[in-house]
Amino acid sequence: MLAAHNFYRREHNVSDLAWNDTSAAYASRWAGNCVFKHSAGPTGENLAAGYTNASAAVEAWGLEGAKYDYERPGFSETTGHFTQLVWSNTTTVGCGRMACNGVKNTPGFYVVCEYYPPGNVVGDHNRYFVDNVKPLVKGKSSD
């Protein structure tokens, strides 16, 4: 799962994330609840459900990047997973998953990833998005 994260970060010329065991334990506990909602914890958080494996969830988040508007940077519900994924100020990630398979209406695998420092920081006329969400590097695989 870490490799999947860093694949997308490299496409945007952003430093690799390091694995954070504390964040992974937190994410695993939250995923174990099989409740598809944000934990309101202290870190940035991406959620996904219904995928056959965790890397497929990260891929879905990465593919949101095609919808990100670099001309009008900022938070959007349709690209929020992507912007957290490639947020340059974020340095660590920890993820957990649970095979919920319909428990509490959460389909398939439930994937939770926690990011520190958190991304998607809103304010200052979206300057934080300008500074932290870098464009796709030309010549990378998804352009």
Image (cartoon, grey):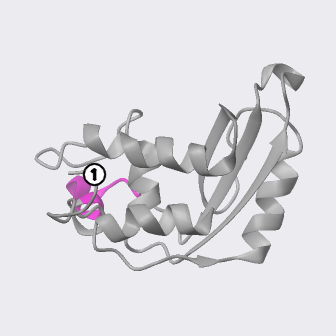
Query: Quick one: SS at disc 1?
Result: loop
In reply to whether residue 125 is colored magenta, the answer given is yes
Front residue of 116/66: it is: 66
Front residue of 11/88: it is: 11
Front residue of 89/111: it is: 111
Q: Quadrant of residue 48?
A: top right
Q: Is residue 69 visible?
A: yes
In the rendered image, the quadrant that contains the N terminus is bottom right
8 versus 106 height, above or below? below
Q: Is residue 17 left or right of residue 72?
A: right
The residue positioned 16% from the left and 64% from the top of the image is 139
Instruction: Classify mark 1: residues with Cα within 10 Å, few (<14), some (14-19) or many (20+).
Output: few
Q: Is residue 75 visible?
A: no
The stretch in magenta equals 120-129
Q: Position of residue 126 (x, y in %)?
A: 24, 54
Front residue of 103/7: it is: 7
Q: Residue furthest left?
A: 71
Q: Amino acid at mark 1?
A: Ser
The residue positioned 78% from the left and 49% from the top of the image is 97
What secondary structure is the magenta-colored segment mainly?
Answer: helix
Residue at mark 1:
142
